[in-house]
Amino acid sequence: MKCKYHTRIKHKFLGDYLSIWLKGVSGKVSLDYVDLFASDGVCELDAELETPLIWDGSALLAVKMSKEYKNSWTCYLNELDPTTCNELQNNLKK
């Protein structure tokens, strides 16, 4: 999915926050992660402002981080478009 630069910053903050949270709670609680606009899980910058030009979106970021968590972490990913939903499923398999 083509994204603006501010989306890159948002995903950086989300990744940093989840990383800090993971260390802070040390698996003491379960987590339910809800992404209502999961898209295909991969973002591509719409202008050549920085590298990397392609990165994991919020859905893939959350799923990858969930593998490091020592307790229950459930990811609920919503995507209305069937084609995009299939792309998300394929990206999650990778």
Image (spheres, rainbow, N blue to C red):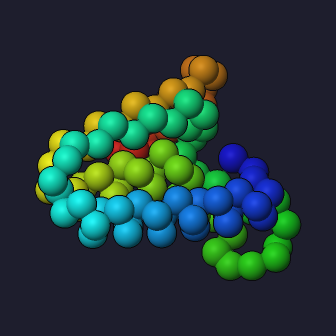
Q: Is residue 13 above or below residue 73?
A: below
Residue at screen point 41% across, 51% down: 62
Q: Quadrant of residue 21?
A: bottom left
Viewer-nearest residue: 57 or 24: 24
- Does residue 71 appear to the left or right of 64 in the view shown? left
- Does residue 21 appear to the left or right of 26 in the view shown? right
**Residue 47, can we see it?**
yes
Viewer-nearest residue: 43 or 13: 13
Circle count? 0
Considering every residue shown, the one lying at the far bottom of the view is: 50
Q: Is residue 73 above or below residue 37?
A: below
- Does residue 50 appear to the left or right of 20 in the view shown? right
Residue at screen point 48% across, 69% down: 16
Percent coordinates x, y for residue 88 in the rendering? 50, 38
Considering every residue shown, the one lying at the far right of the view is: 47
- Does residue 66 appear to the left or right of 76 in the view shown? left
**Residue 44, can we see it?**
no
Viewer-nearest residue: 42 or 30: 30
Percent coordinates x, y for residue 51 in the rendering? 68, 79
Percent coordinates x, y for residue 27 in the rendering? 17, 56
Residue at screen point 56% across, 53% down: 57
Residue at screen point 63% across, 22% down: 81
Percent coordinates x, y for residue 53 in the rendering? 69, 69
Q: Is residue 32 above or below residue 66?
A: above
